[in-house]
Amino acid sequence: MSKVTVGDIDINYQIQGSGSPLLMIMGLSFSLLDWGKKFTNLLAKHYQLILFDNRDAGLTSQSTSSYDIVNMADDAAGLLEALNINKAHVFGVSMGGAIAQQFALKYPEKLDKLILGCTFAGGECSQFGDISGLITGNLLPLLFTPSFIQNNHQELEDLLKETSPFHSKDEALQRQLQALTTHNTCDTLSNIKANTLVLTGDKDVAIPPVNTNVMVRGIPNAKFEVIADAAHGFFYSHADKTVQLVHSFLQ
C-alpha cells in the first residue's frame, strides 16, 4: 500500500493487477480490505484495480472538518489525477455508490463505465434499511444472509478480526454518516451519461433492493442485475458471480 496527498488528506491506496483502470470505492466506515481477497484477486486478472480508503476510514487521513459526498467524489478524482490516470471505470458500493454517482455527475470526462452496487439515490426517492449494526458492531447480519453466516462463520469472524481495526469510529464515523445524509441524486440521475450497471442482492437489509428500481429508471443507460440469496456484502459472499457480471459488462 502507498499514500498520496490529495487536497487536505493523504489517501491510502493499493494498485493490483493490470489492464483497464477500475477505481473501487468502498462504503461507509469500511476500508479497502473489506472488498475481500478473493474478489479483488479475481478482478485483478482482468483490470488494474485502484483500491483506496475514503477519508476518515482505513489508513487515509482523518478529516479536520465536515464534508459532503461531493467532496468525497473530489477525493476519488484527485486520486486518479495523482496517479496520472485520465479515465477509469468506477465501481462503488453502498456509500461508495453514492460517491460514484457524484463522480459521474461532476467528472464525466474521467469516467468510462459505471457500476453501482447496493446503493441508493438518497433524498426522498429512497428507502433506507437498518444500518444500526455499524454503530453496535454487529456487522455480520448487516452484510450477509443468516445461511451464509451459519455456513461460513469462522471465515467471517477471521475477516472481521482483520478488517475491523481499520473501520471508521467515533467522530470519523459521525462525519461519514453526516456526509451520507447530503447525498441526493433523485433529480439528477438522468444527467449520468455513462453506461451503468446496477447490482443488488435480493436479501439486502441495509439498502433494500427496491432502491435499484429508482436507479435504473433514472439513469438513461442503465441495466441491472439482482444476485439471488445475497445481502449487502454480495461482492464477498458471491464473489464469482459478481466478477462474472462486472467483467461481462465492462467487456
Image: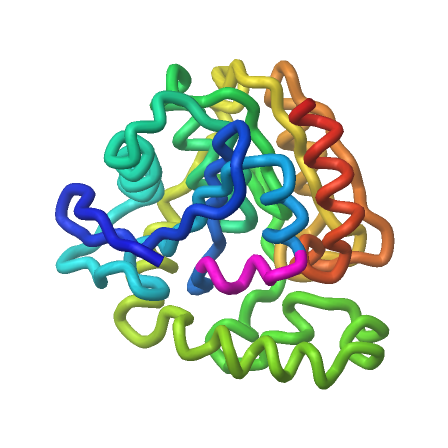
Residue 165 is inside the magenta segment: no
Please name the residue shown 27% across and 52% down the image.
11
Q: Quadrant of the C terminus?
A: top right
Please name the residue shown 82% across and 81% down the image.
150
* Total numbered labels: 0
User: Seen in the image, is 167 located left or right of residue 240?
Assistant: left
User: Seen in the image, is 125 located left or right of residue 210?
Assistant: left
User: Seen in the image, is 107 located left or right of residue 20?
Assistant: left
Q: Is residue 227 above or below residue 33?
A: above
Place residue 132 in its image quadrant: bottom right
Q: In this view, does 61 lie above or below 117?
A: below
The residues colored magenta run: 32-38
Please name the residue shown 86% across and 51% down the image.
228
Residue 111 vs residue 95, the one in the foreground: 111
Q: In which quarter of the image is the N terminus?
A: bottom left
Q: What's the image's color scheme?
A: rainbow
Q: Position of residue 71 (x, y in %)?
A: 27, 40
Q: Where is residue 203 in the image (x, y as percent from the top left)?
A: 78, 57
Please name the residue shown 54% across and 50% down the image.
94
Q: Position of residue 243 (x, y in %)?
A: 71, 43
Q: Can residue 124 be seen in this view?
A: no
Residue 212 vs residue 124, the one in the foreground: 212
